[in-house]
Image: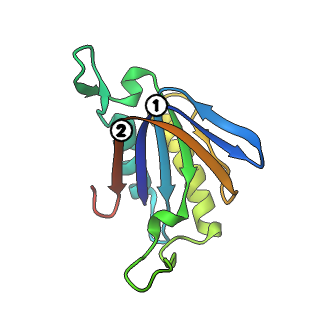
Amino acid sequence: MRALIQRVTSASVTIEGMLKSSIDNGLLVLVGIEEDDNEEDLTWLSSKIVHLRIFDDENKIPNLSVKETGGDILLVSQFTLHALTKKGNRPSYIRAAKPEFAMPMYEKMIAQLEKDLGKPVQTGTFGADMKVALLNDGPVTIWMDSKRRE
């Protein structure tokens, strides 16, 4: 499971011209799921996201997590995080999980993040053509991969 985490002052998802979800201060998390992901990957990644200390404390030092600041999370499924670009110029997405596996894992990730964060998580819509807008704060953007534990 891969995640691209961005600290934001605002983020939103629009589908077919209609606002689906939005947050103010918090994290926009793009998540990519592959066929061999499991519950261990999911719980590890959720915990890392919720406890990642990338928000400034009163001394302007990044010592606080999204949970500690009361921030929100907007989770968006993105199979293209598993793009392979070694050959040619057209990315291959063969490592990305098929929807029948990825959708239930995405739903489990939502539930795990809500449990770890202690409040509802905003989301995109799995498989939809989404327009994602964000104001990256910092900018702070972090890449995580549950297989590499980094």
* Residue found at x 39% / y 57%: 41
Residue on which disc 1 sits: 26
Left or right placement of residue 47 versus residue 28 in this view: left
* Residue found at x 49% / y 28%: 118
* Residue found at x 40% / y 29%: 66
Q: Residues within 10 Å of mark 2 (few under 14, many from 20)?
A: few
Left or right placement of residue 124 versus residue 134 in this view: right
Q: Residues within 10 Å of mark 1 (few under 14, many from 20)?
A: many
Q: Is there a contact, CB below 8 Å, between mark 1 and mark 2?
A: no
- Most foreground residue, 148 or 87: 87
Look at the numbered disc 1 and give the secondary structure of its residue.
strand
- Most foreground residue, 49 or 124: 124
Which quadrant, please, contains the C terminus? Answer: bottom left
Residue 61: percent from left, percent from top: 22, 24
Please identify the quarter of the rendering in which residue 55 is found.
Answer: top left
Q: Amino acid at mark 2?
A: Pro
Report the coloring of the rendering.
Answer: rainbow
| Closer to viewer: mark 1 or mark 2 | 2
Residue 78: percent from left, percent from top: 54, 58
Task: Give the label on residue 53, or none.
Answer: none
Q: Residue pushed farthest front?
A: 89
Look at the numbered disc 2 and give the secondary structure of its residue.
strand
Above or below residue 45? Residue 97 is below
Instruction: Pick whichever of labels 1 and 2 is earlier in the sequence.
Output: 1
Q: Amino acid at mark 1?
A: Gly
Q: Alpha-carbon distance for marks 1 and 2?
A: 13 Å
- Most foreground residue, 74 or 118: 74
Above or below residue 82? Residue 145 is above
Task: Give the label on residue 139, or none.
Answer: 2
The image shows a total of numbered marks equal to 2
Residue 86: percent from left, percent from top: 37, 81
